Image (cartoon, rainbow, N blue to C red):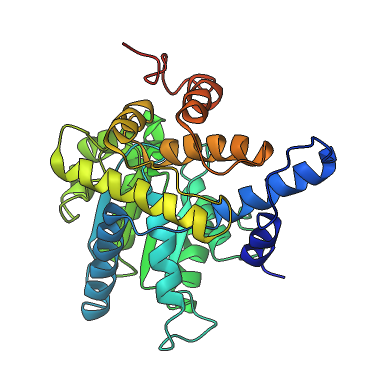
Amino acid sequence: MDTITTTARVFSRPINTEGDERPSDRSRRVAVARAAFEAIQLPYLRQDELSAALDEVRFTGLLTKGQPQGGIGLGADTGSGRSVGARRVNAYVEASEEFDPKSKPIVIATIDGSGTTRSVPASILKALEVPRPETGTEPILWMRAISELQRHETQLLIVDEFNRAARRMTMSSAIATSLRDLMDQGAVPIAFLGTDEAKDLFKRNPDLGSRLDAPVSMDRLDWLIEEDRELFCGFLRGLDMEMVSHGILRAKSGLDSPEIARTLCEASNGNIRQISRIIRTAMMAVVRRDDEAVARQDLEDAVDDWSIANGCISYNPFRAG
C-alpha cells in the first residue's frame, strides 16, 4: 500500500474527541503524515533555473567533447534548495530512454568534511559506487576517478559542498588546480555547488573561476521584493494544497494569506528549508491532536520549537510588536 493511500485512510475518520486513542496509534499516524509531507515535491522557480543551467553546461560539454571543458558555480545558503535542484536534474536525465542504464550521465560528488586533496577524487569514486573509493595514493585516486567517469560515460560532474574545499588554505589551491586540470583535459564539465565560502576559493584561484559561466543565484527570499514575495506565497499556497490532497490535513490552512506569509518569511529568513521545517513542525502538532488544519498558534509554537531551538532566529515574529 503506498504512502498517500495509507495517509488518506488514516485521516478519513472523524476527529477523536474522547481521548481514547492509544499512544502507539497516534505515533503511527504522525509518522505516516510526516513521511507523506517529506514526499511532497513542489516546483520551485530557483531550483528550476539551477536545473536548466546545469543541463546547459551538460549539453555544451557533449558538443565540445574532447576539448577543454567549462563549468558553472553556485554559492547559496544551506537549505536554499541547491542540492535538491541538482538531484532533480539528475533524476530527469537518468530517466531518459536515450541513456544506457549502466551509464551515469550525471555524477553528484559530495566533498566530505575533511576538505583534503584526496577527498575530491574519493568523493567522485564514492558517488560512482566504486569499491574501496579511498584506496590508493592521491595520484592513483585521480587516475581511478577519471577512468570511472569515462567508463560511466559521465556528461556532467557536480561537486556539492564545494565550500568545504575552501576551509583549508593549504589545500584549497591544490584542489582547485586538480579540478581545473580535469576540465582542461576535456574529461567532463563541472558544476560547483556550495555556500558562499566557496567564492573565496574562486577568488584565490582565478584560473579556475575564469573558466566558469556566470554563477546561478539562489539568494534568500526577500519579502520586500515583489518577485520574491510572489514566489514565496506561491510556494506556501502549493504546500497548503498538497497537504490536503495527500490526506495529511483535512482542510487548507491559509498559509499564503498576506499576514501569515509575511511573518513566515521573516521567521524562516527567506530560506526554503527553514520554511518547510516550520510548517512540518506545525503540521505534526495538528496531526497529534487530530485537528483539521494548521492554525496561527501552531506556527508560533513551531517557530519556538524548531527555529529558535535550532538557532535559526533569536525571536518569534508571530509575537513581535
- In the drawing, does residue 102 fall left or right of residue 190? right
For the point 49% across and 79% down, which residue is it? 103
Residue 15 place in picture, x, y as percent: 68, 45
Q: Give residue 62's quadrant in the image.
A: bottom left
Instruction: Where is residue 192? Give x, y as percent.
Output: 33, 51
Nearer-the-camera pick, 92 or 141: 92
Question: Visible in this render: residue 139?
Answer: no
Please indicate whether residue 50 sits to the left or right of residue 110 in the image. Answer: left
Can residue 199 be seen in this snapshot? yes
Q: Residue at x 43, y 35 (%)?
A: 274
- 133 on left or right of 24: left
Q: Nearer the viewer, residue 19 or 229?
A: 19
Q: Residue furthest top?
A: 321
Q: Quick check: 177 above or below 173?
A: below
Report the quarter where the C terminus lies. top left
Spot occupied by residue 169 in the image (x, y as percentages of width and height): 36, 29
Q: Quadrant of residue 7?
A: bottom right
Q: Position of residue 125 (x, y in %)?
A: 54, 61
Q: Residue at x 36, y 32 (%)?
A: 264
Location of residue 2 with respect to 253 vertically, above or below: below
In the rendered image, the quadrant that contains the N terminus is bottom right
In the displayed structure image, the side of residue 204 where residue 172 appears, left or right? right
Question: Which residue is more in the foreground, 64 or 46?
Answer: 46
Numbered disc total = 0
Asked if residue 62 is positioned above or below residue 275 in the image, the reply reads below
